[in-house]
């Protein structure tokens, strides 16, 4: 991990198996990060990927401030964010975000941010709460 020069960004190594895509939520894992998922403690999001990285390669992770992407499909399944919607760590899709808070016992409710525009998320990662 190293600081990447401002804007709340840090550089980590992808230690997970799949490629992490821009906008996907990441969690600390060993000596780096892997895709986060809202299915248990220890997999909470610490930030969103700004860059893509295959396993073993470095990526930039944004942890605070605004993150703007032209296409949010890799994280939300839709190219655009819903303005005004709160986004949560998804319990079904690794690295995913959802505008619907998890409700199933054993899942984690972790708000990641609020959409300001169809392309910009106000990144304000909250602590996860186990249901």
Image (cartoon, helix red, strand yellow):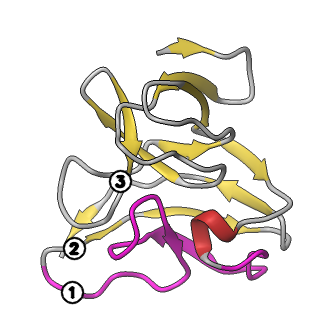
Report helix, strand or loop for mark 2: loop
In the rendering, which numbered label is found on residue 107? 2
Query: Is 82 colored magenta in this rendering?
Result: yes
Helix, strand or loop: magenta stretch: loop
Nearer to the camera, 12 or 16: 16
* Mark pair 2, 3: CA separation: 13 Å
Q: Quadrant of residue 14?
A: top left
- The residue lying at 58 percent from left, 52 percent from top is 124
User: Residue 77 at x, y = what percent?
Assistant: 61, 77
User: Residue 57 at x, y = what percent?
Assistant: 52, 24
Magenta stretch in the rendered image: 78-105
The 10 Å Cα crowd at callout 3, few under 14, some 14 to 19, many 20 or more, is some
Extreme-left residue of the structure: 106
- The residue lying at 52 percent from left, 36 percent from top is 54
Q: In this view, does 118 lie above or below 20?
A: below
The 10 Å Cα crowd at callout 1, few under 14, some 14 to 19, many 20 or more, is few
Task: Name the residue that disc number 1 marks.
Answer: 104
Horizontal side of 122 relative to 124 (left or right) equals right
- The residue lying at 75 percent from left, 49 percent from top is 67
Report helix, strand or loop for mark 1: loop
User: Residue 59 at x, y = what percent?
Assistant: 59, 29
The 10 Å Cα crowd at callout 2, few under 14, some 14 to 19, many 20 or more, is many
Horizontal side of 21 relative to 69 (left or right) equals left
- Tell me, yes or no, whether the two marked residues, 1 and 3, touch with CB atoms within 8 Å: no
- Tell me, yes or no, whether the two marked residues, 2 and 1, touch with CB atoms within 8 Å: yes
- The residue lying at 74 percent from left, 29 percent from top is 7
Q: In this view, does 53 lie above or below 130?
A: above
Task: Name the residue that disc number 3 marks.
Answer: 127
Q: In which quarter of the image is residue 120?
A: bottom right
Q: Is residue 80 above or below residue 38?
A: below
């Amino acid at each position: 991990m190293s600081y990447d020069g401002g804007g709340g960004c840090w550089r980590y190594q992808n230690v997970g198996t799949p490629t992490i895509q821009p906008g996907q939520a990441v969690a600390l894992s060993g000596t780096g990060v892997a895709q986060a998922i809202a299915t248990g403690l220890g997999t909470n999001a610490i930030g969103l990927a700004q860059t893509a990285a295959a396993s073993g390669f470095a990526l930039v992770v944004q942890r605070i401030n605004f993150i703007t992407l032209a296409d949010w499909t890799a994280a939300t399944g839709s190219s655009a964010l819903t303005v005004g919607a709160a986004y949560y760590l998804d319990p079904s899709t690794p690295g995913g975000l959802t505008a619907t808070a998890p409700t199933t016992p054993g899942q984690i409710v972790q708000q990641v941010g609020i959409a300001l525009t169809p392309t910009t998320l106000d990144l304000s990662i909250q602590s996860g709460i186990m249901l």
